[in-house]
Every structure is written in structure tokens, then in C-alpha cells.
Image (spheres, rainbow, N blue to C red):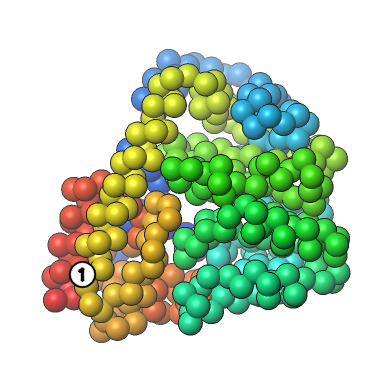
Amino acid sequence: MEHQHGGKLIEAAQANNLNPDQIVDFSANINFLGPPPLILEAIRTNVSKIENYPEINSKTLKNLIAEKHSLAAEQVTVANGAAEMIYQLNNVLNPQQVMVIDPTFSEYELAAESAGAEIRHFKLNQSADFIPDLEKLKADLNNQIDLLFICNPNNPTAHLIRADKLEAVIQKAAQEDIIVVVDEAFIDFLTEPEKYSTIKLLESHENLVILKSMTKLFAIPGLRLGYALTNKSLSLELESKRDPWSVNYFSQLAGEIIFSNQQEIKDFVKLSRKKIAGERKYLYQRLNKFKQLKVYQPTTNYIFIDISETEYTSTELKQELAKKAVLIRNCDSYHGLQENYIRIAVKSRQENEILIEKLNFLLN
């Protein structure tokens, strides 16, 4: 497998003789409001600080995150994006067998393969709209599996599992000595993330690891910032067996602002959730008017679409839209999806209307 992700603006621009600034990028699931002004201003003001090393192990930020989640600082590991922790977990745990729930984020499998693990695929069924059968998942868990990755909400299908439903899976996994990694990269886009987050389960489940990403909601993917929450023992291992300066100064600064409990950040999160919810509803309704598309119910800031009833494969549709300066995510690199599915981010009303206009031209 290769690293296949959205946001490849430069490649798309070069292939279609466009300026990257001309392209409307629906392929990367980033908050369309952009970064909070408070973060941008802090970076501008502190540019000269690049002459100093960042704080080792992001201790200040770690304490702020722990306070936010009512956890001990020793349960937090700050990372250069959540993806770093996916690889770090595999390197530290050295699993022999890793289960992934397909289709899902490809880095789980790539990270496991990089550590020499065998991959077990739990396949979601198209006939069930890719909603996971948790009873079957529990039945498939056995002591040969060392590590289970669950993306919640799932990328790219956007299906969402309540925390109480996930707890039964985590409990069964504990009986089989399986560590469960719940990736909550997109959960903070929800209006009520606490209903679905497993953070409240950490106290009673030693086999649980939660991954969080700051790059999506706060629109800072170029900085890279995420963190892992787990038991103190595993957290110490994750921390001690890696580069102590993996998180750069500006990422630490952004994180400290995000978790500093300032009203401006609270207002930004509230506004983001409101705006994204409104545009998600609008875009879902508009897309549903295309009879050739099967549009899956979105839960976060992206929408999963079956295009098998159109005359295009996902590769062809991506290419045709790219010619028109619109970039979408072709899902053919996800296990089990082949050339029938795309994923699009929820963006501003003006940008969403551009996408609808281009689809109208191609599909009608």
C-alpha cells in the first residue's frame, strides 16, 4: 500500500496546468473557516522563537490537555499529528496481528505493516450501508489479535458508534488481551461529541488508547498536532521511545492556545460546529437531487458517495472535476471500495455551490 490522502493540490495543479490557488479542494477534510485568528497572530508575533528548541515532550501542553479531559498528565502523549501516534503505537507494542475495519484510514494498515504485523481485515458490507456489525466484530476477536483500530466517526464512510456500544467491544477485547485504539480525529466536529467519545471509558479500561487530532477542526494540517490518551504505563512507553522534539514550537504554541480555555477559542469551536452543520445539511440535500448518486448520511465534515450509477469511475470523475479546478477524494485506495466511491469535504456555501455546478455539468 502507498500513502494515499487528500489535499494533493500541487500534484493536481501541475497535472491540469492550474495555479494551486485556483483549485477548490474538497479532498481534504479541514475546517473551511481556516485557523483561529488567535493562532495566526500568535505565530506571527513569535516567529523569532524558532531560534530556540521546542519544549521537550510538550510538557506545558500536556498539562493543559490533561486538565481539559480531567486526566493525569502522565496519561497524555502529545504528537506530531495523530498519525505519528499510529506508527509509534505499532513500534512500541510490536503487534503480531492487527485488525482493521475496512474501509477505513489507510495509515492503520501501513503502520502495522511497517512494524512487521500481519493484517486482519474486518470487512464492512455495502448491503448494510457499511454500518459495522458489532456483535460479529466481538465474535471475531480472539487472542491471536494484539491490536484493533476503530475510527469513530469512520473515514471515509462517516458512520458513528456511540460510546456505550463501543464499550462492549473494548470489554471483549480486554478478555482477549487486545489493545483497542479508537481514533477520534473527526469527533470534535459533532455538536455533541461527548455522546460518542470514549474518553470517559479510560478510567475503567486499561486496554484503551484514544487518538485525537487538532489539525482538522482548527485547520492546521501544515503544523501537525495531535495526542494520545491511555493508561500511564503505555503513555510512558510511547513518550520515552521517540524523538523528544517531535512536536515543533509553533505546534506547541497553537496547542497551548487551543487548550488555554480562552473565550475566543470557545467561540471559534461553537461557530465552526454551527457553520459546518448548516453546510453539511445543505450539501447533502443538494447532492441527493442527483439520481445517479447514493449519498450516505453524513455525521461530520465530509460526505461519502456511491457513484456506481453514473457513467464515471471514481478516477474518471476526479480527473474531470480536476480539469474544472475542483478536487475530490477518490476512494479507490480504500479496501473494498474500488472505483465506485468518492468522498467530499463540507466547505463554504460558495464553494459547495461550485461543486454542485460542476457536477450538474458532468452528470446532467
Q: Secondary structure at mark 1?
A: loop
Residue closer to the observer: 244 or 238: 238
Q: The N terminus lies in which quarter of the figure?
A: bottom right
The reply to whether residue 222 is visible in this rendering is: no
Q: Residues within 10 Å of mark 1 (few under 14, many from 20)?
A: few
Residue at figure coordinates x 48%, y 43% from the top left: 192
| Image position, residue 274 (x, y; %) | 34, 40
| Image position, residue 19 (x, y; %) | 24, 50
Residue closer to the observer: 187 or 4: 187
Q: Which residue is tagged 1?
A: 289
| Image position, residue 15 (x, y; %) | 30, 64
Residue at figure coordinates x 65%, y 54% from the top left: 164
Residue at figure coordinates x 50%, y 62% from the top left: 159
Rendered view: 262 above or below 229: above
Residue at figure coordinates x 17%, y 64% from the top left: 358
Residue 347 left/right relative to 114: left
